[in-house]
Image: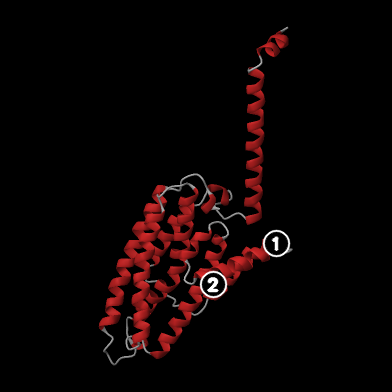
Amino acid sequence: MIAQMRQPLSPSGIEDYWVASKCRLDRWGRAMRRIGASAGANTPADERADWPFLRGVLEEVLTGEILTRTWAAVLTAHDRTRDGHHSEPIARSVLIAHLEARHRVLTLLVRGGALGLAWGVRLNRLRRRCERWTDMLIGYLIGVDPDVAEFAVDPDRARDFSEDLRYRSQLAGGRHAWPLVITSIRAAFGRGLGTSSPNGDLNEQIATSVLACLPSEVFDATGLFQSLWLTRLSSVSSDAQRMLDGLIAEDAAADLSRPGKRLRERR
């Protein structure tokens, strides 16, 4: 929906996203330097007093990449829809910095000494899970703008997801696909992650900034998301109302352009 909007997004929402993301990236950098500095220690990673915090940082980098890539794709597609360059540069800046943090995490996984074999394997499985979900979400956007495949981890896989999603949406009950996706992604990440969130405050700010950019019609009167069916129905109703208003305006203009008719009506 956002990718196809003609109206501009909230400037404060975009700015808040950039500021909170940069602050989180700085925290990640300091934390990973601590992990790298302890690479030569004989103490296993999970026996260190600060391991819950460091583990949370590594998991944040990997799981946060899903939103960073997807949001970058959304903002880029939105700019292209409006023939502008307002949000895309900010989204790309955040993504590039996030990919640098990802590279540092992968370097730690390859070396192994800083994390240990067991934790290296677990984090690598999490990485692969995040990559597949990212490409699937990008696949939804490819139907709107095929060029956003560049934001996928594996563009070819994202295109395959897009074709499959397009096929499934045409089947009976296809409108129920998105609620199933939400349920599945919650199940995929509901277990196995650390209980602590090292940067919970910034994660909340980033999520809030993204929500601030969403159009008001996707929320109901209580501030909760409307169902996709209700959102589409509201959109169709608004389109129909605008069409009727346009026709009425055209009829009124046509009447005013015929002075003879106005004279007869006065008589």
In the figure, is residue 101 to the left or right of 74? Answer: left
List x then y, in percent, for residue 50. Answer: 32, 80
| Structural distance between the alpha carbons of marks 2 and 1 | 20 Å
In the rendered image, the quadrant that contains the C terminus is top right
List x then y, in percent, for residue 248. Answer: 66, 28
Q: Earlier in the sequence, mark 2 or mark 1?
A: 2
- Element type at mark 1: loop
Nearer to the camera, 206 or 128: 128
Q: Can you identify the residue that label 2 sits on?
A: 157
At 51% across and 77% down in the image, what residue appears? 129
In the figure, is residue 184 to the left or right of 19? Answer: right
Is residue 51 placed above or below 255 in the rendered structure? below
- Element type at mark 2: helix
At 52% across and 78% down in the image, what residue appears? 191
At 52% across and 64% down in the image, what residue appears? 138
Q: Are marks 2 and 1 in contact (CB under 8 Å)?
A: no
Is residue 248 placed above or below 91 in the rendered structure? above
Bin the neighbour count of mark 1 within 10 Å (Cα to Cα): few under 14, some 14-19, many 20 and up: few
- Give the residue type at disc 1: Gln
Nearer to the camera, 56 or 118: 118
Q: Can you identify the residue that label 1 sits on?
A: 170
- Give the residue type at disc 2: Arg
**Based on the displayed image, in which of its 4 quarters is residue 257 positioned?**
top right
Nearer to the camera, 105 or 224: 105
